[in-house]
Image (tube, rainbow, N blue to C red):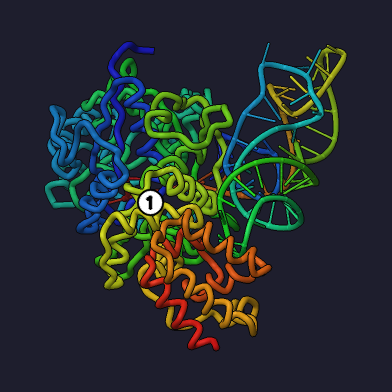
Amino acid sequence: MSERKVRVRFAPSPTGALHIGGVRTALYNYLFARQHGGDLIFRIEDTDSTRFVPGAEEYILESFAWLGIQFDEGVSFGGHYGPYRQSERRDIYKTHVARLLAEEKAYLAFDTPAELEEQRKAVPNFQYDATTRGMMCNSLTLSKEEVDQRIADGAQYVVRFKVIPHEEIHVQDLIRGDVKINSSVLDDKVLYKSADGLPTYHLANIVDDHLMEISHVIRGEEWLPSAPLHVLLYRAFGWEDTMPSFAHLPLLLKPDGKGKLSKRDGDRLGFPVFPLEWHDPKTGEVSSGYRESGYLPEAVLNFLALLGWNPGTEQEILSMEDLIRLFDLTKCSKAGAKFDYLKGTWFNHEYVLNKSNEAIAPLFDALLQEQGIHEPIERVEAVVGMMKSRVNFVKELLPLCKFFFVAPETYDEKTTKKRWKETSAEQMTQLADLLEGLDDFSIAHQEASVMKWIEEKGLHTGTIMNAFRLTLVGDGIGPHMFDISAFLGQEETIRRLRCAIEKLG
RNA sequence: GGCGCUUUCAUCUAACGGUUAGGAUACAUGCCUCUCACGCAUGGUAUACGGGUUCGAUUCCCGUAGGCGCUACCA
């Protein structure tokens, strides 16, 4: 292992919203970089011009800003290894592919997509490789004159990598160990496309990682099959001694059924698969996001970190600092993880619970304002303090807490049936009179006075309290009664009591 | 089809070859209690299958089966 500085990258394609699996990959890269005092680079891999989606790059950047994953270098962050957008690096790729061509490690291929399609149909398991390239139309089978003529005629061509067969290629993977594959099963991958004058992922990726001095490539398992090709490319360029280490992460799978997690699963099962709400500019479709659904970024990160990795201890609630300290690539699991979104809501619950009321209140206040409810922030904080333990998400506070700010207009039918007896009107009238006469409306004083009254009259505490609750809340939910009445204040409490007595009879 | 990766409760996962196979989520029950929750306690369910190696295998090897990925001039 080399002593060089740790430099890792997250390199998405701007083809749409950032998938939650991509977020996890970025997180692992971030944790690894921070732990080793290294750099995290943000590179945009936009070599497929046909799939470019406007706004995607900005969306990805905003997602990481919300999550609190910071990059050291890259698109929008600057740095000395730029440009960091592959579409702006055409010349670099061009000179590199020319080198491969000059050294006869790659060749020109003139076969049209239609011709290739024909071959695939005619020949079972057709692959463009050492066994078939001699039968195809390329600079290996054509004379130099023919090749020059075709180029002069403006023929379209691609550059293909000349894979040497019968070679055992080893990929050292930090998670999976030594992965071997015979080069004969590899095809002569297209390195340079004819259509847009841009390289394919494979070429651009290797050139950039080398030039940007990337030390570790941490990416999804879907890249494992092409890793041997990448090794061959490093070798072809003579960069094998500085080739980065590889770590292929297990994939995030559908919670039910089969296959990898997709946008559809989120729609179907009712959970977000994107960090932020995404408006697809092409289809106009709107997909929900973790942010808009009320998740706290820390909870999302904690949840994702533990999907495919764990510190080996029984601690599950881990801060970013904890994660940075404990993260270990070699302890990542190898098999794909079904996306357990229910556990994600539990993580959010834990973070809502453990965050201070002062931190949660502004989030809730924003929702209240949308409802036209404007309250001093101290009162919102008080309500949050009383109620946050019963929700997974801040927005769930809304229906649960409305009664704190708005008097009930109706009374829940079931609760009324159960809690409002024939004697209730009389008892509540007495209670209202009692509370009205108090000089001190503190929780303690109310409780002392009311409990004394209950005892003297030989009443049942539950009966009184449940009826009382119905009058203030309109339902059978909420915190301790005197917490509610103290919050509402004497005047409002009496008013609600009398109102309910009148309505319920 | 070919190639590769992979396999412990329903789910996420732990266990230098020796453990009553542990934790968490979800679920169920109980406790607490003026309600709803929180919380606490308790409970059930797992080493895919078949061969080896070994005194001893969840752990190492081989096979089978299942799962996943790749197999584009997409990344």
Total labels: the figure holds 1
Asked whether A195 or A79 is in front, the reply is A79
- Find residue B17 and report its horizontal and vertical position in percent: 72, 17
- Label 1: chain? A
Asked whether A447 or A216 is in front, the reply is A447
Residue neighbourhood size for the residue with mark 1, other residues' Cα within 10 Å, grouped as few (<14), some (14–19), many (≥20): some
Inspect this view and state whether residue A57 appears. Answer: yes
Q: Quadrant of the C terminus of chain A?
A: bottom right
- Find residue A111 and report its horizontal and vertical position in percent: 31, 50
- Find residue B20 and report its horizontal and vertical position in percent: 81, 29
Asked whether A169 or A304 is in front, the reply is A304
Q: Which residue is mark 1?
A: A19
In terms of secondary structure, where does tag 1 sit?
A: loop
The residue sitting at 35% across, 69% down in the picture is A405
Q: Quadrant of residue A204?
A: top left
The residue sitting at 46% across, 66% down in the picture is A400
Q: Amino acid at mark 1?
A: His
Q: Quadrant of the N terminus of chain A?
A: top left
The residue sitting at 50% across, 76% down in the picture is A471
